[in-house]
Image (cartoon, grey):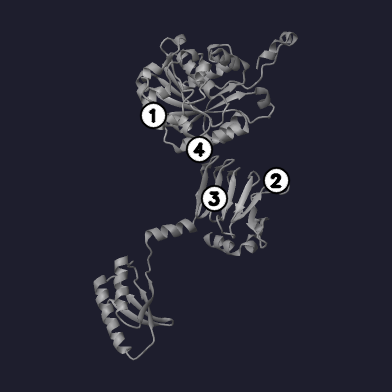
Amino acid sequence: MDSVILKGRKNGYEITLNASANFDDNMVDLNRLLEKLSEAEQESDSDLGFYLKTGSRLLNDAQMKRIYDLFDKYKGFSIADLQADVADLAAIAAAEKVNHIHVEMATIRSGQEVSYESDVLFLGNLHPNGVLKSRGNIFVMGDCSGILCAGFPDNEDAIIVGDISNVPQIRISDTVEIINKKNQQFSKSTVALINDLHVLDFDTLDHLSSLRPKLYRKMEDNL
Amino acid sequence: MAISLVITSGKGGVGKSTTAANLGTALALMNRRVCMIDLDIGLRNLDVIMGLSNRIIYDIVDVVMGRAQLHQALVKDKRFDDKLYLLPAAQNSDKNVLTPANVVDIVNQLRPDFDYILLDCPAGIEQGFQNAIAGADGAIVICTPEIPSVSDADRVVGILEQTDMKLAPRLIINRINRQMMNSGDTMDVDEITKHLSIGLLGIVFEDSNVILASNRGVPVVMDPEDNASQGYRNIARRVLGESVPLMTLKEQKPTFFQKLFGRHQHKH
């Protein structure tokens, strides 16, 4: 039973399948372990949920099915959770897409719409009638004369930072603001955000720690 | 083998056909064999500017529909020996008859016989535009110093950049009113070029002779003394790879006698 280890944890039983062993050996040992446990638990009526850990082995669908089928054979035993310490490349790429800041240096021309899943640091040129859309925040350092759309479609916490003097319109989540230079002064440290009244509002970067503490901490951690 | 260039703008009325006619004529004057193709089906006017309307027997749609051979539809401009030909657009056909594949096929058939093929693109970015850019190795984008024109040119450049053309698009700023540009009433040449971020092929000044020439069916570029003609000739030389300085934007001050006799009023 070397390739399978049973441990008692605060929240229940944890079974670790040794990733360096052959998976078939894992299954044989797991079957033997469950057999033993079922004999010991025969008199108990309560259900036991096990937390399975597969270490650095990422199970495929067939392997996962074999494990679930095995547990189905033992009445009262079930799998509460099945986890590996690794993730597949597609999942990592998807997470990366959302979490990292994308640096965009391109020219977005009239009629073009560029969308991102993550935060965007925009260093390029956004021409009139062009649209820069992001699910996250937008940090503007380039020339912007087109529409900026942060937190699309429903991220109310998103912000737009930078000089938006020449931007005709900004959108955050489901709110829209037509920029009127006469009524508002913009600078590099302008922050556009949705306030507590769900109205698109403007502030300055030095208040970011109180306006969006989570984002502020995240940015500090990244520095 | 010919290089095919599409002359496009997005916006109408900025001088696409005029530029195609004058650039084609200028290249023919420089001893290059040129074929101009009018792709504005239903609203053809390249033939009018060239003064060739009365000589059209077949058009591009006739060729595509198999009613005529390609060489039968080509209209030869007798003023330039064997140097300049026009393939006219149809005036009364459904504009959707033509497909990008048809244009590519026609351009490829013409390539061995010419040095340059100029495709006169219709306004807009619909089917006609797609047909025109499909057959082109490169694009010449025309804009005037007006924001709507620059904005449309920007849209067109965006589309052109997404298509796989052999040559990068180049810009002609047409109908420049020197007085307005010098006084800052319109965007200046640098601003437009910087905004569109493509190479500048040339500038052409606003000139009433261009309208007169179009009405007469004699492209203005045939008059070597004319201001706009000089602009088109410079553009043709740059197309051929020569390095030609831009024309000056400074206005010529009328002399005392010109003022006295009012002769300067006709010059721009």
Give the secondary structure at mark 4. helix
Report whether mark 3 lies on the same chain as mark 4. no
Q: CA distance from mark 4 to mark 2?
A: 28 Å
Around disc 2, counting alpha carbons within 10 Å, would you say few (fewer than 14), some (14 to 19), or many (20 or more)?
Answer: few
**Distance of mark 2 from mark 1, alpha carbons?**
50 Å
Question: Is A107 above or below relative to B115?
Answer: below
Name the side, left or right, on which B264 lies relative to B4: right
Q: Amino acid at mark 3?
A: Lys
Total marks drawn?
A: 4
Where is residue A150? Give x, y as percent: 57, 53
Q: Quarter holding the C terminus of chain A?
A: bottom right
> Do tags 4 and 1 sit on the same chain?
yes
Q: Residue at 58% of width from left, 45% of height from top? A: A142
Specify few, some or many for label 1: CA neighbours under 10 Å numbering under 14, 14-19, or 20 or more.
some
Counting other residues with Cα less than 10 Å from the Cα at mark 3, is it few (<14), some (14-19), or many (20 or more)?
A: many
- Specify whether disc 2 shares its chain with disc 1: no
Q: Which residue is mark 2?
A: A181
Q: Are callouts 3 and 2 both on one chain?
A: yes
Check if mark 4's residue and mark 2's residue have beta carbons within 8 Å: no
User: Which amino acid type is shown beneath numbered disc 4?
Assistant: Gly
For discs 1 and 3, the disc positioned in front in the rendered view? 1
Q: Which residue is mark 3?
A: A133
| Circle nearer the N terminus (3, 2) | 3
Numbered circle sitting on residue B158: 4
Please determine if labels 4 and 2 lie on a single subunit. Answer: no
**SS category of the residue bearing label 1:** helix
Q: Distance from label 1 to label 3 (Cα)? A: 38 Å
Q: Determine which of the numbered discs, if any, sits on residue B102 in the image.
A: 1
Rounded to the nearest angstrom, the CA distance separating label 3 from label 2 is: 22 Å
Chain letter of disc 3 in the image? A
Between the residue at mark 3 and the residue at mark 4, the CA separation in whole angstroms equals 17 Å
Which residue sits at x=39%, y=87%? Answer: A46
